[in-house]
Amino acid sequence: MTRPLIILMTCLAGLIVAGCAKQNRNAIYVLVGTGSPDFDLAIEGSTSQFMVTGPGKEDSYGEISIRSDGTEKGMFRWGGSVCQVGTATNPPNEIQFEGTTKEVLFYGVAEMDPETGDGVLLKKGRIQPGAFTLTHNYNELITALQFDEER
């Protein structure tokens, strides 16, 4: 009777550890783009790569700095950008976008597995042309999954 119980407990422990390991791989990503169909699929979690058509480096859409907890994580200058701002086990308290844009830009904040692209969209929004600063509290994003129009 003891041996089957030990085997059952060992299998259960293995499943718990495997589940925790998979969950811990998830990362927090920020995607910024001009709203192409590929970008829309990327922020909905259907694809992890996208191509944005638009002006070249000499005639850029503007410049955006992406920070998490005050540390710069990436820059968007033209085309599109994907950058990791944290992990599911160590998420940032705050995600900030700051810069200037000449065109309407769209962004998404997602928690997803870097290998499979599976995950959840935490926030998507729109950035209107001009100078802007957007700040999102990560804990609030977890509880409010909605579309926002922002400046």
Image: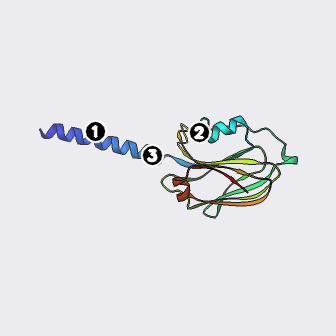
Identified by mark 2, the residue type is: Gly
Q: Residue at x 68, y 48 (%)?
A: 107
The residue drawn where x is 23% and y is 39% is: 8
Q: For numbered disc 2, what is the local secondary structure?
A: loop
2 or 3: tag closer to the N-terminus: 3
Kindly give the residue lying farthest to the right in the view shown: 58
Asked whether the beta carbons under mark 2 and mark 1 sit within 8 Å of each other, the answer is: no
Disc 2, disc 3: CB below 8 Å? no
Query: Residue 23 got which mark?
Result: 3
Query: What residue is pinned by disc 2?
Result: 45
Residue 50 as seen in the image, left or right of residue 84:
right
For residue 144, above or below residue 17: below
Residue 80 numbered tag: none
Residue at the location (59% across, 49% down)?
Answer: 146
Residue 109, position as x, y percentages in the image? 61, 49
Q: Is residue 26 left or right of residue 83?
A: left
> Could you tell me which residue is drawn at 32 percent across and 41 percent down?
14
Between marks 1 and 3 in the image, the one whose residue lies nearer the viewer: 3
Separation (CA) of disc 2 from disc 1: 32 Å
In the image, residue 75 above or below residue 6: below
Give the amino acid at mark 1: Cys
Say what amino acid the circle numbered 3 marks.
Answer: Gln
Which quadrant of the view contains residue 100? bottom right
Residue that numbered label 1 is attached to? 11
Sequence order check, earlier mark of 2 and 1: 1
Which quadrant does the N terminus fall into? top left
Among the 4 quarters of the image, the one containing residue 34: top right
Pinpoint residue 111: horizontal percent, then vertical percent. 54, 47
Residue farthest bottom in this picture? 70
Query: Gap between marks 2 and 3, in whole Å?
Result: 17 Å
Asked which secondary structure carries label 1, the reply is: helix
Q: Secondary structure at mark 3?
A: helix
